[in-house]
Image (tube, rainbow, N blue to C red):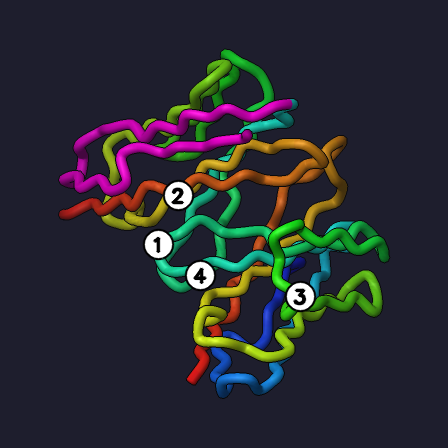
Amino acid sequence: EDQVTQSPEALRLQEGESSSLNCSYTVSGLRGLFWYRQDPGKGPEFLFTLYSAGEEKEKERLKATLTKKESFLHITAPKPEDSATYLCAPGGQGGKLIFGQGTELSVKP
Amino acid sequence: DAMVIQNPRYQVTQFGKPVTLSCSQTLNHNVMYWYQQKSSQAPKLLFHYYDKDFNNEADTPDNFQSRRPNTSFCFLDIRSPGLGDAAMYLCATSRDLGTGEYIQYFGAGTRLSVL
């Protein structure tokens, strides 16, 4: 059975305090690993897709990395506007996304 | 800007009263999806259309139906809403499925309340 686990469930950081979010997965026939950002009361916003182990992608203060069983979302020197829930979603059979529960990030000034 | 638009943003209905949520897209994508997301939970796929082909998830209740009259529009019908159906409903689109370009782009969602 396909499974996705994100940790931690919630993360509180001070502005400028770098950290990482983890996504562990067991998915047969993996077709990409997707990261989304979701603000309260809004739909998920696409951030990155990673397709192969060792691949990295960056966008502003965010960097996503991928291994065969995990993906990390590294946040460098975060700002309050980075506060959101970050969702990890491996792509499974037929291109369906298997969403994790998300990590709720709060960055305090 | 090209995008996925959901209407209304907020919908209040009564227990058992049918309700329809709508989604439109200007991305000209082949695939449209409907998800249900309850508070602090992951989005749960209800069904999707690939062009006109409808694909229902095995655990989607019969109470939920969908229509896609053309490429741009897709509707979610809840025939007899129960209290447990109160949730955020998300529409998403992708160009393709499983191969090629299948990044999913989401609308802002419709928050459904059932009284």
Cβ atoms under marks 1 and 2 closer than 8 Å: yes
User: What is the chain letter for disc 4?
Assistant: A
Residue visible at 72% across and 36% down?
Answer: A94
Q: Quadrant of residue A8?
A: top left
Give the amino acid at mark 3. Asp
> Residues at marks 2 and 4, common chain?
yes
In the picture of the structure, the residue carrying the numbered disc 3 is B62
Mark 1: which amino acid? Ser
State the residue position of label 2.
A101
Q: What residue sits right under mark 1 in the picture? A: B40
Q: Earlier in the sequence, mark 2 or mark 4?
A: 4
Q: Which residue is mark 4?
A: A42
Is residue B30 magenta-colored?
no
Residue drawn where x is 53% and y is 51% of the image = B44
* Residue at the (47%, 19%) spot, across then down: A66
Q: CA distance from mark 4 to mark 1?
A: 13 Å
Helix or strand or loop: what does disc 3 sit on?
Answer: loop
**Image height of B29 relative to B81, above or below:** above
Dot 3: chain letter: B
SS class, disc 4: loop
Q: Are marks 4 and 1 on the same chain?
A: no
Instruction: Give the foreground label among 3 and 1.
Output: 3
Instruction: Please state which amino acid type lies under the numbered disc 4.
Output: Lys
